[in-house]
Image (cartoon, grey):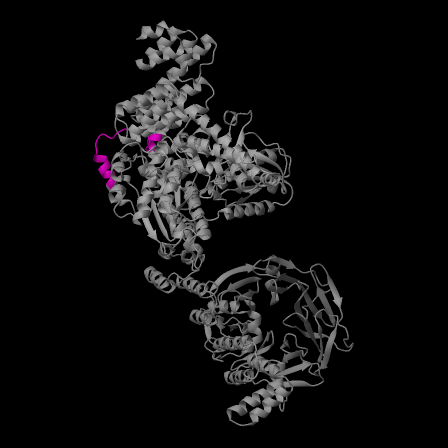
């Protein structure tokens, strides 16, 4: 793949400072409660915390660590510190502890540290539970976790459901603050593009914050010049497709959590699991993460041969050379060897699963959905998928893909698929279907086109700021996806002349076996190329999006590295495939993409976020 | 003096604020006989005698006037009520000195300033003292009784020592010290035994020194701690002086006491001689940090010790470096070669830097711009002959003098000395200008001194705007426009604060207009809420993008409006509605139901019931909740959901029977799983019944059969 790559891709900025900032602030906050204390940590803050601070840093102030969970705490310390997300549920948990202590006449100090910020609603709950006066609150502005040299995650998976389903705008402020932080460290960003209402709101709020703070960004050398904000609902299709690049497959199969993955016994071929950090530092992984799965095996076997050859060099070495080899190279080789065997194990495991599920057939069905033929056949495939109870999440995903590519299901299919699904997987999914309808992922075809026309006109009117915030009113109107028309307009389905060479890809479509160019990435490509939205009016109309493009004061010369560094912000999550596609684009165009996402997502995570089953 | 008083000063109650502050006069009050129609007049003047305001006094008998540190006028009434007015005689507030004072009346009162603020001390008709050390944080203190006190003390004073406020009083030949808990007799050291009874006492500006005057004309001067005598003097005047005040400079060893009788002014100090002046008319002494101001009907003078720098320069035949430098510069201007001689003389002594500093310092003490100029010119001349003389002190002095001259102008009338100005600081001076509504001058000074906008200009503009909104004669539009014209978007200006002031003045419309100029919509919200414009507040909160603010407003609305109106308001604001819904989902599920009910949102109500069924433990409860959901779904015309939920009820009931019949867990299996379990367990009849009841598609039924059990006749039969 390296053959077409340009050599002048800028290096990514050093995001280590983000970790240091967060760590230092946390230590400072903990020191604000002097003396020995027990620390309660919200479960989903554990992994991010792990990435920025090791336990020993926390230990010097903290006696015991607990997880915030439904069980009551058994702490004996006189000072309790809670490190939590601003959630109502957690507030109740804390209030229960405080109230229990009050009942038993015990007095302790309580401190709540909210990450990334405190919400008034939380204080309201504390007040209603009658413990507001007993606790002190603080904010740990840990907005950004650098997962890799080019991935920054806000680790807010709930963003997707909160904003797109519930119309809850509270995280917008967090995104704006995160942008402000990045802008102050790596900016000023000279050009901003975006699509989607949320993107626009985040952008505007960020601009307001900038104006209020009046920080002098002048004179600093920007490291990131462009920023592109995109709402997840601009492109659901890409997120719903089966991932084919290695990193995506690992994520789909084993779930990458906060940049690391637990390889179970079936991968490690021993009886214990191994936790592996997946990032650019992993020499093996960094070379295969963006590859199409079909070429990964070949690469790995080549790699193992190379490794063997390097090992073999020891034969015929004299003592001195041998000493050199052992002291310098052996360790690296061993490390590489270990990783190689792990990734080979992972590949085998993926292969096993994929063949078991008639993976090929599913991919074929997906491709026909994307291309828009043999819809009947694909529908039957989905029916069978449901009947055979392959996986509730997978079935749901296929249904959504069908709906969104076809602009909604026809009424008959809509009913029958849902009925079959409920019968097969259980009736509690009824509410899930309601959610999917609200968010526009699984809808019924509208009777006529008239509604769409009105909708279009209204949403054109609703581009100004105040009105733009009535998003939610339109959420229920279930936006039309217009996927087919957009796909045609942007040429998302590559015309095939002969076999698509997945080892030497020509375009971003390789991430989906050459069958489909991810829409989100295509939009970014087009806009960056045109330096704006000009010429994309028709696509925009079909996308129903609120687009914007603004140039900052400092328009630097395009040759500068910062001008070729683009911060791609995905509001609602970004998939590994999209990252792979954009990395490919970057290598082709000689620019560097930095990903800022509310969380790394996948089709499975999106579907799970919509589920409304019993807890 | 500009004031053109007709009355004699002795007929008026007078109070003048220190630091060149304003003067208050209460006229006609001395005439105790009630002449109808002649109400007392309360006037305030600037120190130059320009009338600031005048009001007829309508309240009770005033015993004492006084000024607070922030230049508010205190009027202490006989009944112990203290009324507070501002500089322009606008009533601000009042407080009472307590019941005891109310009953026994105020005999005498004193206003004093300590590090805690402005205090009031009262001597009541029962010869008891009551103190309040800070009128802004009123804590009344009743001092202990003085044993055997039958008549009012001949004189008394308030002292402040080690941050404790105490009262010193004299009864005949005895001195008593009253602190919080006790009363003790004290004797000043070195007091001549034949001195006689005390008639008058004076405490210095800084509470360090004390002077006592006895009926033999003897004056004792010493430290206020009564531990050390500084000096004494015998004036041989037996009548008590009308006023006795200290006149001294900070850090100077020359301390003196100034006493005023009707037509005589006497200055005594550490010397056998005294200085006497004749007073042409009634005068009033105002003690200052570095001297004494002497007010009369026609003049306003300042008596002070000549500072050392000025003495050195202007003393006759002085050979001090400063004097020589001044002389040299004068000669230089006359183009005389003597200039060089003088200069050489200073340079030979290597005293040129000192000479320059002396001239600069002396310039500060001069009030005449001409003298200031000549001294500064001399300094600047001398500076040229010194390598690297740091220019800051010179520049600073020029700036300070420019400011001082501007405010000393009689139109402004703040006769501050340089020492006072430095003590007061520029910030306080600006505050005082703002208090006098001299906004343009204040802004000019800020600009001249290049003070930061937030600290200087914007603060003053904000004050101006707050004053502007009180002008009732102008229309809301005019005022709002005028304010916006002048303020524009100066950094540091908070339109919401000005709007808040407008609202306090009873101009809500103007407040709303002003809020429109506030760029940060978040800032507008609290005031809008206070003004009960909740709906506007809600939309502003939403506009700000700050969800916390939206919550604040929502919660406020919830308490303010009745439930119906509250919900209606939310319905029109989707953003607020979804936020509130999110909150209810976790915290008040019942409210959620009401919310949907209000809106006739049957679909959501159905969902709500389904959700509640999750938390029901018993089958009956679950079925009940689901049945409610079915009803709502039908109302919502969502037949699919209704049907699906009915099926779920059916399945639940059936599963319970199966569970009882076969003693195996069937509950919560999907239909599919139920059927396959039945087939696996060999209950084909039952399975078939389910197939019919639930209209399972044939295709599925086939697979069911084949996956459930090999070659099951039931499945074949079903085909």
Q: Foreground residue, B105 or B557?
A: B557
The residue segment tinted magenta is A436-456
- Residue B559 percent across, percent down from the top left: 43, 41
Q: Is B366 left, or right, of B590 in this rendering?
A: right
Q: Is B349 left, or right, of A456 in this rendering?
A: right
- Residue A404 percent across, percent down from the top left: 30, 31
Q: Is A537 left, or right, of A309 in this rendering?
A: left
Q: Residue at x 41, y 54 (%)?
A: A188
Q: Residue A76: which quarter of the image?
A: top right
Q: Is A342 left, or right, of A198 in this rendering?
A: right
- Residue B664 percent across, percent down from the top left: 47, 11
- Residue B18 percent across, percent down from the top left: 56, 72
Q: Give the answer, above or below, for where B196 lies relative to A172.
A: below
Q: Residue at x 75, y 77 (%)?
A: B195
Q: Residue B375: which quarter of the image?
A: bottom right
Q: Foreground residue, A31 or B414?
A: A31
Q: Foreground residue, A64 or B308?
A: A64
Residue most extreme to the right:
B193
- Is residue A445 located in the magenta-colored stretch of the structure? yes
- Is residue B77 located in the magenta-colored stretch of the structure? no
Quadrant location of the N terminus of chain A?
top left
Q: Give the answer, above or below, for where B671 lies relative to B303.
A: above
Q: Can residue B18 be seen in this snapshot?
A: no
Q: Residue B149: which quarter of the image?
A: bottom right
């Amino acid at each position: 793949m390296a053959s077409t790559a340009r050599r002048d891709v800028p290096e990514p900025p050093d995001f280590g400072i983000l970790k240091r900032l967060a760590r230092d602030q946390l230590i400072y906050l903990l020191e604000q409660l002097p003396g020995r204390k027990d620390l309660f940590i919200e479960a989903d803050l554990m992994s991010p915390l792990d990435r920025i601070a090791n336990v020993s840093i926390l230990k010097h102030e903290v006696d015991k660590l607990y997880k915030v969970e439904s069980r009551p705490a058994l702490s004996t310390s006189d000072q309790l510190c809670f490190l939590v997300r601003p959630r109502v549920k957690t507030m109740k948990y804390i209030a229960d502890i405080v109230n229990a202590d009050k009942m038993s006449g015990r007095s302790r100090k309580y401190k709540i540290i909210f990450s990334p910020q405190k919400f008034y609603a939380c204080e309201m709950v504390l007040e209603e539970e009658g413990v507001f006066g007993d606790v002190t609150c603080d904010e740990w502005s840990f907005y950004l976790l650098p997962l890799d040299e080019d991935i920054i995650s806000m680790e807010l998976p709930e963003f997707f459901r909160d904003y797109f389903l519930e119309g809850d705008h509270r995280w917008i402020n967090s995104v704006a603050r995160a942008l402000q932080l990045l802008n102050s460290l790596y900016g000023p960003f000279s050009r901003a593009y975006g699509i989607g209402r949320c993107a626009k709101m985040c952008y505007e709020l960020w601009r307001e914050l900038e104006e209020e703070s009046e920080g002098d960004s002048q004179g600093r050398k920007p490291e990131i010049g462009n920023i592109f904000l995109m709402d997840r609902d601009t492109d659901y299709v890409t997120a719903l497709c089966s991932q084919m690049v290695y990193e995506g497959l690992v994520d789909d199969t084993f779930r990458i959590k906060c940049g690391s993955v637990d390889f179970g016994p079936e991968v490690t071929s021993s009886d214990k699991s191994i936790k592996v950090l997946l990032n650019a530092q992993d020499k093996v992984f960094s070379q295969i993460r963006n590859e199409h799965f079909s070429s990964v095996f070949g690469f790995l076997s080549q790699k193992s041969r190379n490794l063997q050859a390097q090992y073999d060099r020891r034969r015929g070495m004299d003592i001195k050379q041998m000493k050199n080899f052992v002291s310098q190279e052996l360790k690296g080789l061993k490390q590489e060897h270990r990783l190689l065997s792990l990734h080979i194990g992972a590949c085998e495991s993926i292969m096993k699963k994929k063949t078991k599920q008639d993976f090929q057939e599913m991919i074929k069905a997906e491709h026909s959905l994307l291309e828009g033929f043999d819809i009947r056949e694909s529908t039957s495939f989905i029916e069978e998928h449901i009947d055979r109870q392959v996986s509730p999440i997978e079935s749901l995903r296929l249904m959504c893909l069908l709906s969104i590519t076809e602009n909604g299901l026809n009424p008959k299919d809509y009913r029958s698929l849902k009925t079959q699904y409920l019968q097969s997987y259980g009736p509690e999914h009824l509410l899930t279907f309601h959610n999917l309808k609200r968010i526009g992922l699984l809808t019924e075809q509208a009777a006529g086109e008239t509604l769409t026309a009105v909708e279009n006109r209204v949403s054109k009117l609703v581009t100004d700021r105040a009105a733009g915030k009535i998003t939610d009113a339109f959420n229920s109107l279930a936006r039309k996806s217009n996927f087919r028309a957009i796909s045609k307009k942007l040429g998302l389905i590559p015309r095939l002349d002969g076999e698509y060479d997945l080892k030497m890809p020509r375009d971003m479509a390789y991430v989906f076996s050459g069958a489909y160019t991810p829409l989100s990435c295509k939009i970014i490509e087009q806009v960056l190329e045109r330096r704006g939205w000009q010429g994309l009016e028709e696509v925009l109309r079909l996308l129903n999006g609120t687009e914007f493009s603004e140039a900052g004061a400092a328009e630097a010369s395009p040759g500068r590295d910062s001008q070729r560094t683009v911060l791609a912000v995905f509001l609602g999550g970004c998939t590994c495939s999209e990252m792979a596609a954009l990395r490919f684009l970057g290598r082709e165009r000689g620019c560097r993409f930095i990903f800022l996402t509310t969380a790394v997502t996948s089709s499975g995570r999106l579907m799970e976020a919509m589920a409304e089953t019993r807890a | 003096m500009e004031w053109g008083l007709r009355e004699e000063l002795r007929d008026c109650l007078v109070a003048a604020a220190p630091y060149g502050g304003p003067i208050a006069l209460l006229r006609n009050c001395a005439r105790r006989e009630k002449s109808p129609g002649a109400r007392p007049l309360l006037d305030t003047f600037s120190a130059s005698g320009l009338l600031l305001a005048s009001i007829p006094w309508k309240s009770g008998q005033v015993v004492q006037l006084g000024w607070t540190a922030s230049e508010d006028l205190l009027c202490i009434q006989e009944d112990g009520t203290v009324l507070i007015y501002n500089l322009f005689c606008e009533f601000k507030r009042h407080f009472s000195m307590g019941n005891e004072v109310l009953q026994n009346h105020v005999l005498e009162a004193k206003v004093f300033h300590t590090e805690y603020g402005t205090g009031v001390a009262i001597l009541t008709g029962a010869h008891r003292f009551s103190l309040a050390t800070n009128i802004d944080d009123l804590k009344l203190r009743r001092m202990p009784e003085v044993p055997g006190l039958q008549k009012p003390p001949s004189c008394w004073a308030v002292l402040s020592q080690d941050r404790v406020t105490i009262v010193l009083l004299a009864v005949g030949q005895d001195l008593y010290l009253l602190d919080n808990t006790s009363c003790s007799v004290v004797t000043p050291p070195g007091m001549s035994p034949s001195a006689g009874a005390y008639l008058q006492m004076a405490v210095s500006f800084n509470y360090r020194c004390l002077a006592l005057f006895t009926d033999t004309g003897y004056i004792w001067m010493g430290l206020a701690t009564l531990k050390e005598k500084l000096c004494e003097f015998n004036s041989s005047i037996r009548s008590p002086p009308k006023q006795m005040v200290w006149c001294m400079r900070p850090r100077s060893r020359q301390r003196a006491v100034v006493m005023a009788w009707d037509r005589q002014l006497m200055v005594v100090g550490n010397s056998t001689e005294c200085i006497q002046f004749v007073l042409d008319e009634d005068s009033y002494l105002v003690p200052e940090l570095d001297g004494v101001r002497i007010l009369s009907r026609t003049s306003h003078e300042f008596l002070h010790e000549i500072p050392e720098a000025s003495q050195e320069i202007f003393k006759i035949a002085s050979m001090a470096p400063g004097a020589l430098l001044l002389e040299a510069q004068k000669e230089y201007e006359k183009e005389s070669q003597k200039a060089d001689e003088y200069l050489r003389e200073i340079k030979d002594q290597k005293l040129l830097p000192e000479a320059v500093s002396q001239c600069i310092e002396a310039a500060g003490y001069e009030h005449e711009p001409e003298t200031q100029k000549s001294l500064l010119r001399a300094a600047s001349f001398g500076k040229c002959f010194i390598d690297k003389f740091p220019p800051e002190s010179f520049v600073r002095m020029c700036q300070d003098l420019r400011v001082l001259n501007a405010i000393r102008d009689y139109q402004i009338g703040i006769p501050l000395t340089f020492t006072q100005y430095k003590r007061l600081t520029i910030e306080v001076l600006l505050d005082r200008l703002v208090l006098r509504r001299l906004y343009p001058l204040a802004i000019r000074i800020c600009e001249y001194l290049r003070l930061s906008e937030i600290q200087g200009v914007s603060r003053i503009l904000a004050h101006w705007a707050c004053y502007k909104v009180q002008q009732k004669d102008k229309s809301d539009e005019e005022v709002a426009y005028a304010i916006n014209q002048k303020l524009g978007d100066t950094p540091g200006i908070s339109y919401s604060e000005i709007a808040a002031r407008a609202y306090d003045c009873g101009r809500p419309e103007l407040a709303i207009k002003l809020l429109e100029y506030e760029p940060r919509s978040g800032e507008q919200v609290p005031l809008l809420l206070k003004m009960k414009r909740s709906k506007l507040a809600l939309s502003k909160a939403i506009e700000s993008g700050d969800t916390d603010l939206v919550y604040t407003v929502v919660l406020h609305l919830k308490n303010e409006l009745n439930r119906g109106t509250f919900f209606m308001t939310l319905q029109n604001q989707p953003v607020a509605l979804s936020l509130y819904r999110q909150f209810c989902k976790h915290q008040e599920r019942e409210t959620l139901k009401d919310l949907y009910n209000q809106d006739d949102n049957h679909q959501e109500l159905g969902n709500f019931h389904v959700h509640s069924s999750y938390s029901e433990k018993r089958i009956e409860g679950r079925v009940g909740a689901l049945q409610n959901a079915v009803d709502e779904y039908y109302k919502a015309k969502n037949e699919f959901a209704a049907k699906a939920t009915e099926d779920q009820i059916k399945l639940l009931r059936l599963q319970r029977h199966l569970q009882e019949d076969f003693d195996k867990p069937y509950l919560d299996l999907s239909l599919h799983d139920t059927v396959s379990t039945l087939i696996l367990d060999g209950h084909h009849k039952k399975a078939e019944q389910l197939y019919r009841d639930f209209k399972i598609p044939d295709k599925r039924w086939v697979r069911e059969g084949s996956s459930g059990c090999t070659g099951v006749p039931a499945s074949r039969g079903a085909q």
